[in-house]
Amino acid sequence: MKTLREYITDAVEKKVAIGHFNISNMEGLWGVFNAARKLNVPVIIGVSEGERDFVGVRQVAVLVKSLREEFDYPIFLNADHTYSFDRVKEAIDAGFDAVIFDGAKLSFEENVALATQCVDYARSVGRDVLVEGELGFIGQSSKVLDEIPAGVLLDEHSLTDPVKAKEFVDQSHVDMLAPAVGNFHGMLRGGVDPKLNIARIKEISLSTGVPLVLHGGSGNSDDDFRAAIENGVAIVHINTELRVAYKQGLQKGLADNPDEIAPYKFLKSAVEAVEAVAEAKLKVFNGI
């Protein structure tokens, strides 16, 4: 089986993107995995610090590894939005395939220094662990929003600067970069977020020469996804839409089976709801 790095390289060459879906439990994991297998495309499971604390750092690593080995399938695990070197190290030591050091709220110099420390550690462990850096603040919470998150500005002057992005990548040596390009975490209650700045994505891609990662994909349009992928995005993150689908699926399962007490029976609708969203996104990301 190819490595995650090789699958990302393939995605860049083919002008497609790997779907990255956050999970908090087994239902979410099975929903995403079922969707990926149905379409026969690689997939990344993401767990934020909060999600890792709930599922278990080592536990989720074992779960994903077990699926990869049992089904001989390209499913990978990423430590999403990690805010300290210690927690990056924790994920790498547990066997994660990739980590994100999120220093977006730090000064540029602090961000570079800590990202570099993370890269150096990842290179020292004897296996290929990818490190993603983040430059530009896009909020921190995957939830349904009434307005754009505080501190997130979508004007051109507030987006990630291609020159600074190149400087960041050149100094830190991160493998991938998550920029601010009109995206933000969570999604607006109406379900449709403002358009992405595709021109800025292209500029950052050309200046840095590394694969770009689009965070906060929930709420973005299919056309924006396609344009972003065409111009340098190799991974797209989806979380909020999965959370909404899971909750609605759970509510349906409970409503349809009010007397049922076996979780594996009333949770089936939640798995199916997550699978449906993941499948729809994977089709767009992979041009299916």
Image: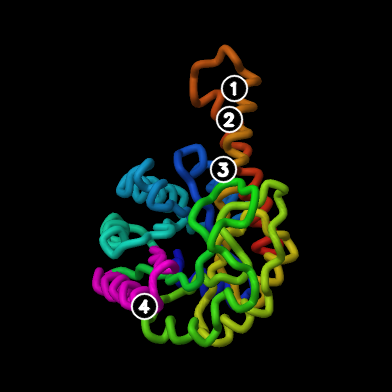
Q: In this view, does 54 lie above or below 131?
A: above
The front one of 30 and 203 is 203
Tag 4: amino acid: Val
Q: Name the residue under label 1.
A: 254
Q: Is residue 32 above or below residue 165?
A: above
The magenta stretch spans residue 255: no
Q: Mark 4 points at which residue?
A: 112
Looking at the rendering, the stretch of residues picked out in magenta corresponds to 98-126
Image-quadrant location for residue 76: bottom left
- N-term mark: 3 or 1: 3
* Image quarter of the C terminus: bottom right
- N-term mark: 2 or 3: 3
The magenta stretch spans residue 107: yes
Residue at the extreme top: 259
Tag 2: amino acid: Leu
Numbered disc 3: secondary structure: helix
Using the numbered discs, state the Cα–Cα distance from disc 2 to disc 3 in whole angstroms.
10 Å
Q: Which residue is drawn at 53% across and 57% down?
A: 20
Q: Where is residue 118 in the image (x, y as percent from the top left)?
A: 31, 70
Q: Mark 2 points at which residue?
A: 250
Using the numbered discs, state the Cα–Cα distance from disc 1 to disc 4 in whole angstroms.
48 Å
- N-term mark: 1 or 4: 4
- N-term mark: 4 or 3: 4
Q: Name the residue under label 3.
A: 243
Numbered disc 2: secondary structure: helix
Judge whether residue 42 can be spotted in this image. no
The front one of 82 and 16 is 82
Judge whether residue 194 can be spotted in this image. yes
Q: Residue at x 36, y 61 (%)?
A: 83
How crowded pointer 2 is (Cα within 10 Å; few <14, some 14-19, many 20+) is rated as many
Using the numbered discs, state the Cα–Cα distance from disc 4 to disc 2 in whole angstroms.
42 Å
